[in-house]
Amino acid sequence: MTQVLERPVALTAPHARTKRKRLGLGKPIPYGRALGPLLLIVVWSAASATGALDPRILSAPWTVLQTGIELTRSGKLPESVLMSLQRAALGFLFGAVAGTALAIAAGLSRIGEALIDGTVQVKRAIPSLGLIPLLILWLGIGEPFKVVVIALGVAVIMYLQTYTALTGIDSRYVELAEVVGLSRAQFIRKVVFPGALPGFFLGLRLGVTGSWLFLIVLEQINATSGIGYLMFQAQNYGQTDVIIVGLVVYGLFGFLSDAVLRLVERRALSWRRTLSG
Amino acid sequence: MATHAVRVSGLVRSFGDRNVLDGLDLAIAPGEFVAILGRSGSGKSTLLKAVAGLDYDVTGDGDIAVAGEIAVAFQDSRLLPWLRVVDNVELGVRPGRGTAALAEVGLEGRERAWPSELSGGEQQRVALARCLVREPRVLLADEPFGALDALTRIRMHDLLRELCAKHQPAVLLVTHDVDEAIELADRVVVLHEGRIGLDVPAHDADRTHLLRALGIGVAA
């Protein structure tokens, strides 16, 4: 439906040939977004092949690929990936559930709001990573500690988005609910929750990105397994190829998790599809 | 059975120290169609909100008695975008009658559509269907056709007249359109400074006279 006329037809005078200058950006280049990264890889390859790029600074792309394959064959990479995935997934799961539960409690009752919102806002002012020293004293440096740090960070993100969405329901819809005589339960089920769903999904997407961020930091401070640990060791031995493999894996994690959430979002918010085209 | 569908007496509504409604009295008989005209700020919408029971943050006084179920048609169709059309119609009532109500407003077969897939006129029809399923004794309408184009508005007028003839609710229609008021209503009421400035049967209503009551001088 969004077909754009290439050449605006001048209706005023049939012989007028003046073509109006188009101020918009015009048609997007197909797969245009892949061009930049591809160019980067080409430059990188050329620099490595000609010897302009010292392998100690940055390994050649083919060395990275080879290392990736070797690490996969030896089982080292899959093992690390699984470890990292488990941490991030558990932290994200607990954080998302806790953040959503708190947001619902605070968003749907004044008492909940009074007790929870202020507390979370205080917590929000303290970066989750700042809690690491205290949490190490309490939990040690094992897996529970890592999962808790990730969960705390994700919970705050989830809370903020979901709470804002729950309390930001259009007052016109509230008026409508009153006019048609909805009960409080019906109001929450038919108006508040579906209306807050876009904000909830935004929270999920920001939360999953946050969980990767916390994971990376945690795995580089004090871990004995995982992708971050692999990269940290590589740093000690000057293996830039292994570091790049780790970065690519982190990148894939972030990209794939966001893609999955976007797919779920599209399904859940199908009423919106008609608006966004 | 009450002799009036709506009875408002001594109604005062204030925002700050300004009395928007200042001792207003109005009675509407069952099945009667009353159009309220008034300049902006004359208190039309305030009156409607008061009758609908939607005025929380205003101070005021006076009595409002309404016999039976009220339905409200807003200026915007106010459909919930995340509910399908039929679920919007059946919002707050037992499911089952939505399809019939949609057929009555000429939207059979569109039950499963999303509101955003409908045109402005169709959305307003759905809003009318949502009023219908409640079988209201009183229909309150706040400029329900204000946002529609002229052609769609004419068709909506016909539809509303037809539906009112069939279901016989008392109607309180707020509008800024003098012609719409004369065409649809049994009685035309002009609000002036928070009270009723003019109250005439629609068949006696004279356009020039009404416009003058609204403060618009028309060269005769």
Image (cartoon, coloured by chain):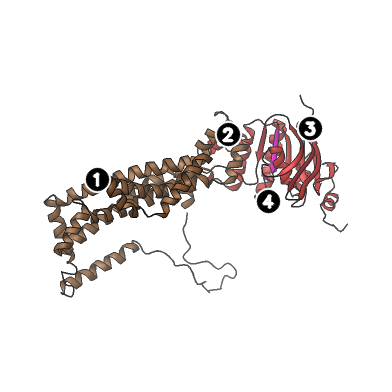
The answer to whether B154 is drawn above or below residue B139 in the figure is: below
Which stretch did the figure color magenta?
Answer: B138-147
Chain B as rendered: colour: red
Residue B150 - label: 4
Mark 2, chain letter? Answer: A
* Local secondary structure at mark 3: loop
Task: Select label 3 or label 2 by which is in front.
Answer: 2
Which amino acid lies under the numbered mark 4 shown in the image of this protein? Ala
| Mark 1 vs mark 3, CA separation in Å | 74 Å
The residue shown at (31%, 62%) is: A34
Instruction: Determine the residue located farthest toward the right in the rendered image.
Output: B220
Colour applied to chain A: brown
On the picture, is A38 further left or further right than B167? Answer: left
The amino acid type found where label 2 is placed reads Leu
Q: In the image, which is nearer the foreground, mark 1 or mark 3? A: 1
Who's the residue at 14% across and 51% down the image? Answer: A76
Label 1 sits on what residue type?
Glu
Q: Which residue is mark 1?
A: A143
Residue A12: percent from the left, percent from the top?
60, 69
Q: Which residue is mark 3?
A: B29
Query: Label 2 vs label 4: CA separation?
Result: 34 Å
Q: What secondary structure is marked by label 1?
A: helix
Quote the CA–CA distance across marks 4 and 3. 30 Å
